[in-house]
């Protein structure tokens, strides 16, 4: 890695964590420069606007989804439905390790920024889509365990809904219970879907 | 209403909408004053800090929950489970009428601000709790239609999760589908819970 790309990397890492923890609006460029140990000139060399830095962070998050979440979950779980819950377990472990302080880096920015930054909004939507596609793939692998009329795209979005809605409440209340309540109810829902698929099989 | 309380009211209304639409950090006091037609001196008279204005807005949102959401839903629906879906229908209608632009005024602030403003975070948690309590009340009214081992507190939090997670995705993607997918799956889940409660009844 060249000095140049290390500097760019440090900016993305530092700003990514600051935006995640305290929000985009509340993070000043001065704070980013001071924490990353980078000069204003270097920042401006890589990113003309604060928004360009944010877009680079979101590209990084998109690239990291696989390596940080999906690959480890798939290594740990072979069953496709357990992979869905493995992904939720990943977020729970993160919530727990941060005392429910940080939430989801995408969800936080989605609700802070959606209306003012169209380009950012599209990139955030792209990360959500990539997340849902991978979960949808698990659901396709579990197709025979689910009733025929279940829309897998909608069910994948529902899994993301449960993750994001639970994270939001857990972060606001600073406790895991609302997240856990989501997972408990989602598990019960999947159990019911599987029971219903088995009774379809018996009828056919 | 006195001139004084009208001024305070205008500040709460104007800032409430601006924070909702564009976020707390992205809204300047200058913008609030100009839109509300109020002088800086009046603002300072009522609210010493921007955060005090935000806290007053959240108090107002808490007061308005009943009148704006729950009372109309209860007038329209007698069945307690339909009341749960009536509440979700209220948010859907709002999403639709704003072309999915604004999302939830509480959820947006929860994810923008949770980490930096402890007092605000507690007030946001209080609004979520009030929302869940009312939904929990509907679930208690539907107790005989739900399996005995379902935790109603957790189920009420799950309904809020479905609302907030769906709103987040709908706002980010600027389309209703992710919200609708949440409601469709939640309805299917409630149907399964009701089927399971009926089979408990037959066994007992």
Image (tube, coloured by chain):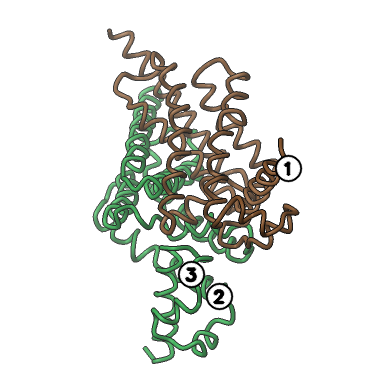
Chain colours: A brown, B green
Q: CA distance from mark 2 to mark 3?
A: 10 Å
Dot 2 and dot 3 within a common chain: yes
Residue B171 visible to the viewer: yes
Distance between the alpha carbons at the discs numbered 3 and 1: 38 Å
x, y (%) of residue A130?
A: 46, 33
Q: Residue furthest right?
A: A37
Q: Secondary structure at mark 2?
A: helix
Q: Which residue lies under the disc numbered 3?
A: B27
Q: Chain of mark 3?
A: B
Mark 2 and mark 3 in contact? Answer it, CB < 8 Å.
no
Q: Which mark is residue B50?
A: 2
Residue mark closest to the camera, 3 vs 1: 1
Q: Looking at this rendering, what residue extends furthest in the left direction?
A: B76
Q: Is residue A180 left or right of residue B98?
A: right
Sequence order check: which comes first, mark 2 or mark 3? 3
Q: Residues within 10 Å of mark 3 (few under 14, many from 20)?
A: some
Q: Residues within 10 Å of mark 2 (few under 14, many from 20)?
A: some
Between circles 2 and 3, the one closer to the viewer is 3
Distance from the alpha carbon under mark 2 to that under mark 1: 42 Å
Q: Residue A93 placed where, x, y %?
A: 65, 36
Q: Please give the label number shown on residue A3.
A: 1
Q: Residues within 10 Å of mark 1 (few under 14, many from 20)?
A: few
Task: Name which quarter of the figure residue B190 lies in.
Answer: top left
Task: Tell me the tag on residue B163.
Answer: none
Location of residue B179 in the rendering, given as x and y in whole percent from the top left corner? 35, 43
Identify the element where label 3 is drawn.
Answer: loop
Q: Is residue A60 left or right of residue B160?
A: right
Which image quadrant: the C terminus of chain A?
top left
Q: Nearer the viewer, residue B202 or B86?
A: B86
């Amino acid at each position: 890695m060249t000095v140049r790309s290390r500097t760019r990397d440090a900016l993305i890492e530092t700003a990514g964590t600051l935006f995640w923890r305290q929000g985009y609006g509340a993070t000043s460029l001065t704070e980013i420069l001071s924490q990353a140990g980078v000069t204003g000139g270097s920042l401006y060399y890589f990113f003309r606007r604060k928004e360009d830095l944010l877009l680079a962070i979101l590209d990084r998050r998109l690239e990291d989804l696989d390596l940080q979440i999906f690959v480890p979950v798939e290594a740990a779980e072979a069953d496709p439905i357990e992979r869905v819950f493995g992904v939720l377990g990943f977020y729970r472990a993160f919530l727990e390790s941060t005392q429910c302080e940080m939430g989801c880096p995408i969800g936080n920015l989605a609700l802070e920024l959606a209306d003012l930054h169209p380009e950012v909004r599209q990139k955030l939507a792209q990360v959500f889509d990539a997340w849902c596609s991978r979960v949808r793939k698990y659901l396709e692998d579990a197709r025979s365990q689910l009733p025929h009329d279940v829309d897998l795209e909608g069910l994948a979005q529902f899994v993301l809904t449960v993750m994001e809605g639970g994270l939001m409440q857990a972060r606001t209340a600073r406790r895991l219970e609302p997240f856990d309540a989501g997972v408990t109810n989602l598990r019960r829902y999947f159990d019911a879907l599987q029971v219903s698929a088995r009774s379809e099989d018996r009828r056919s």
